[in-house]
Image (spheres, rainbow, N blue to C red):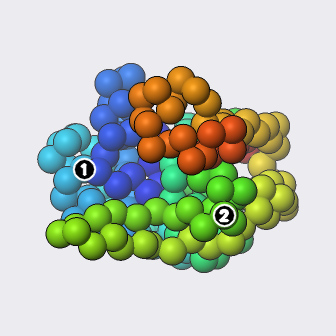
Amino acid sequence: MLDAGCGTGANLRATAKAGAAPVGLDFSMGMLRTAKHAVPDAALAQADLNNNFPLKRDVFDGLLCSLVSEHLTNLRTFFDEAFAVLKRGGRFVFSAFHPDIASAGVEANFEQDGVEYRLGAEPYSVDDYLNRMDDTGFRDISTRAYAVDERLVAEIPWAVKYLGRPLLLVVDAARP
């Protein structure tokens, strides 16, 4: 199972607990060090997801790419590489901050020492993702959008400013 953009390894940990052999790619060596600490048995490699993946072709049963889409500057290469490393019948799950929320100016950010750092976001639409996946050869493509609801606001009060707006897009696809 490949986690493209594995970050600190949260999804790698869940993958390992489920009995799969996790492999992670990330651009940041700092994230990879944290992931290695979290999941010592995971195979990890530094890679820019906008370029060719440093992996063999046709080897993965599944590929997850979670919440890194706003950093992808080359969708064609990313989806071509995702397709290439999956086995026939392999499943691809791609999640992104919903483009509607991104177009409203919401982007990945963090705060350090009282300073907010905004990481930027590529201005993709849902159709950009779906058309590129279809052009690449993925099939059985399905989507689901998740909006901020009252239950989420009860858990995370500051999310009220997004109430009723789509926050997350999840795309599920297969390599035929």
Classify 10 Å Cα crowding around label 2: few (below 14), some (14-19), many (20 and above): few
Assign a secondary structure to mark 2. Answer: loop
In the image, residue 81 sits, relative to residue 145, either above or below, namely below
Q: Which mark is residue 104?
A: 2
Figure quadrant of the C terminus: top right
Name the residue rendered at 31%, 46% in the picture: 9
Asked if residue 84 can be seen in this view, the reply is: no
Distance of label 1 from label 2 (alpha carbons): 32 Å
Task: Give whichever of discs 1 and 2 has the lower sequence position.
Answer: 1
Q: Which amino acid lies under the numbered mark 1 shown in the image of this protein? A: Ala
- Percent of width and height locating residue 28: 31, 68
Name the residue rendered at 42%, 28% in the picture: 155
Name the residue rendered at 83%, 58% in the picture: 127
Position of residue 132 in the picture relative to residue 27 (left or right): right
Label count reads 2
Asked if residue 113 can be seen in this view, the reply is: yes
- Percent of width and height locating residue 118: 42, 72
- Percent of width and height locating residue 59: 53, 46
Q: Which amino acid lies under the numbered mark 2 shown in the image of this protein? A: Ala
Where, by quadrant of the figure, is residue 112 drawn? bottom left
Residue situated in front as seen by the camera: 108 or 149: 149
Classify 10 Å Cα crowding around label 1: few (below 14), some (14-19), many (20 and above): many
Residue situated in front as seen by the camera: 160 or 20: 160
The residue where tag 1 is placed is: 35
Q: Which mark is residue 96?
A: none
Residue situated in front as seen by the camera: 39 or 98: 98
Where, by quadrant of the figure, is residue 85 drawn? bottom right
Position of residue 136 in the picture relative to residue 45 (left or right): right
Residue situated in front as seen by the camera: 15 or 153: 153
Name the residue rendered at 62%, 73% in the picture: 122
